[in-house]
Amino acid sequence: MLSVADPKIITGETGAQQLMGYLLDVGHADGRARCRLEVTQQHLNRHRVLHGGITACLLDSAAGATASLSVDDTGRAPFLSVSLSINYVAPATPGWVEATGTITGGGRSLLFVSGELRDASGVLLATSTGVYKRVPKERL
């Protein structure tokens, strides 16, 4: 069970995170961030499944935090999304979902990160590929 008191669990850091209520877990030894959300009625579209924009946000957040973990073990080094492509595989209904990022390539300034969104039963709901750029320290 996740504890929001755990320093590796990031909550309420951004306006989007506060609005949607997801947790960002950066505490895994594999260097892959997890973004978890309990899907409720407020997250559903008119077809009563998880809104595609929220799916994209979860995948983007997990991928960006995974990129951050490559240079900062707190997962808070800022990276910007350069591009993001989403493939919607199955509908998500109310209950827990989890997005996980995986670095697939890159260099000094850009990282390629894939993502998967799964429900609590492990069913694949969506995949993503994205390019992420580290924010230079002099721009912070």
Image: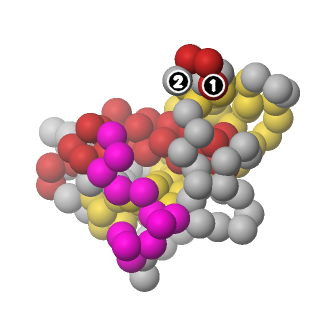
Displayed quadrant of residue 58: top left
Is 2 above or below relative to 7?
below
Report if residue 110 is visible in the image. Answer: yes
Please check the rendered image and state whether residue 10 is part of the magenta-colored stretch, yes or no.
yes
Q: Is residue 27 above or below residue 130?
A: below
Tell me if 25 is positioned left or right of 10 in this view.
Answer: right
Front residue of 69/57: it is 69
Q: How crowded is mark 2: few (under 14 residues within 10 Å), some or many (20 or more)?
A: few
Q: Which residue is drawn at 52% across and 24% down?
A: 140
Helix, strand or loop for disc 2: loop
Instruction: Name the secondary structure under disc 1.
Output: helix
State the mark number for residue 140.
Answer: 2
Q: Is residue 26 left or right of residue 96?
A: right
Residue 47 placed where, x, y %?
20, 43
Q: Which residue, as the protein is rendered here, is positioned at the far front?
A: 138
Q: Residue 137 carries which label?
A: 1
What amino acid type is highlighted by mark number 1? Lys
Which stretch appears magenta? 3-14
Q: Position of residue 48 (x, y in %)?
A: 20, 49
Total number of numbered discs in the rendering? 2
Q: Which quadrant of the structure image shows residue 71?
A: top right
The residue at the point 58 percent across, 50 percent down is 75
> Residue 73's image quarter?
bottom right
Residue 65 pos. (x, y %): 57, 45
Q: Is residue 63 visible?
A: no
